[in-house]
Image (spheres, rainbow, N blue to C red):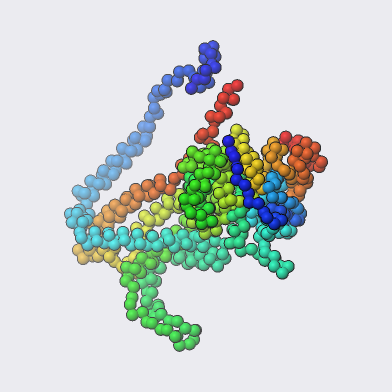
Amino acid sequence: MASAGHTDRAAQATVPPGGGDDAPLIRAIPLRHPWRNTFAVIVLLLFAGFLYDAFFLRTEYHWDQFGKYLFDARVSQAAMNTLIITVLSMVSAIVLGVILAVMRLSPNPVFKSISWVYLWVFRGTPVYVQLVFWGLLFTLYKSFRVGLPFQTPWVDIPFSFSIDVFWLAVIGLALNEASYMAEIVRAGILSVDRGQEEAATALGMSWSQTMRRIVIPQSMRIIIPPTGNEVISMLKTTSLVIAVPYSFELYGRTRDIAVSIFDPIPLLLVACAWYLLFTSILMIGQHFLEKRFARGLTMTDMTKPDVVEPQSKADHE
Amino acid sequence: MTQFTEQLPVQSEVAPDMVVAERVMKQFGSNTVLKNISLTVKRGEVMCLVGPSGSGKSTFLRLINHLEKLNAGRLLVDGEFVGYRERDGKLYEQKPRDAAVQRREIGMVFQRFNLFPHMTALENIIEAPIRVKNQPRKEAIARAKVLLERVGLAEKAKAYPGHLSGGQQQRVAIARALAMDPKLMLFDEPTSALDPELVGEVLDVMKALAKSGMTMIVVTHEMGFAREVADSLVFMDGGVVVETGDPREVLANPQHERTQAFLSKVL
């Protein structure tokens, strides 16, 4: 806006501060990218060739079988199981991961050590091996005993029940994933400015209050993107629970069907289609979660807005 | 614009001085940042701590608020030991919970405001009264609104810190500290992170607070504020108290050459 003090003479001399006509918009000829376009055409041609080959020339794909089994009741039920396993193990892993991360960062050396050893074991061994171990849980531990070492136990309850392999699969995946989540949460917590913890402490808040109310909510912004990746990764890792052995999830079920009809390829494609559907949905969900937790932090530059008005008059003197 | 009309509770018995430091020493590893600091801050006194950066002013404030532990000497706030308990002539390390209880009554304002960015101005202020003092939410909100009005930000209650200017953020931070009804306020370079034109609004709030009778220790480079508001001025350099006295006298006529050298640079 032009201020009243400026005279016409000032306007003629140069462009007056904050006044005058706007300069015309720049209309330049855009840069050409001939190689980019050529490359795109080549890639498209190759891809089209691949599709043509897959659909019309290569009969081993058996697209009719693909169509037949894509919405087969057994397959969609298995897809549901995959989803349930993913959600259950991921939710438990996040809860346990937060606990482990907070323990790792707590001032208590006992908690710190427990968390460190947990991470050492569960991150240091393959998830497939861990799943096999969970399958053997009741072979290892046959009864529940309370007593002193080398004495006849006071209580000795044999495990007459056994946990369903479904739950063993969930436990196995969750405990493994918790160790990765712990590291993600820890990184998130460490990313929060130390001044935040100090301010909360100075207000008399306890360490756990400071964590729950101040630090963890702020760390969410850092934690969510990698957690989204972990969910997607978990969805695919469920295909390993055959190690437990649990085989009613997507990959196990489609493989069993493939074996019974002696035709593996269309059923692999069926499994891939379902996995892709789920991961696509997860990616959309992640996008919205990230938006939600950026609340209050979208404008990180703190001094710019609302600053100048009171002094502006004095500046023109 | 800013008025603090609240009266501080009158002490019936002879109340101890608010802060007593006797030969306080603090080390970080092999680095001694405070040596032999002896200071007394009386009730209702406004003390300004000045000195070059690295002179230990901020560390001293942090000791008072238990954010650091002292290594030697004695430090009492309102007659109570900070960080330790004395029983039968022995010192016992303090439980974090007891430290938190003492901290509640000490308000602290930081150089970089340290407002909680995921909460609005109002939520920042009511957080500690609700969580720490178990104040009912309604009461806390009513009180927060009064405090926001006193710092001139009644209309910013719903703004997030990221949408406030530095001066506004610091005023919210002062209101947040006051919401706990502190008996002592510590200011750690409250205007150093502000653009020059925003310093005045924060100093105005602090002046009004000083007039209301609040005991304040202010680490600052604002000599004008020290001259106008402070009851005493302490000049620190290299972890020791070099000179203390009435701020007007010290600023006009510094006795020690280190004080003279420092003041000639900042005034």
Left or right, residue B35 beside residue B211: right
Q: Quadrant of residue A169?
A: bottom left
What is the residue that sits farthest to the bottom in this orientation?
Answer: A152
Q: Residue at x 55, y 29 (%)?
A: A310
Tell me: residue A94, above or below residue B218: below
- Residue B39 visible? The answer is yes
* Image spot of residue A229 (x, y percent): 40, 53
* Image spot of residue B52 (x, y percent): 71, 43
- Residue B112 visible? The answer is no
Q: Quadrant of residue A165?
A: bottom left
Q: Residue at x 38, y 80 (%)?
A: A142
What is the residue that sits farthest to the front in this orientation?
Answer: B12
Residue A143 vs residue B238, the one in the foreground: B238
* Image spot of residue B200 (x, y percent): 62, 35
Q: Quadrant of residue A161?
A: bottom left
Residue B4 vs residue A288, the one in the foreground: B4
Q: Residue at x 37, y 74 (%)?
A: A136
Q: Which image quadrant: the C terminus of chain A?
A: top right
| Count of numbered badges drawn on the protein | 0
* Image spot of residue A91 (x, y percent): 38, 60
Left or right, residue B123 beside residue B57: left
Left or right, residue A89 beside residue B46: left
Left or right, residue A169 beside residue B109: left
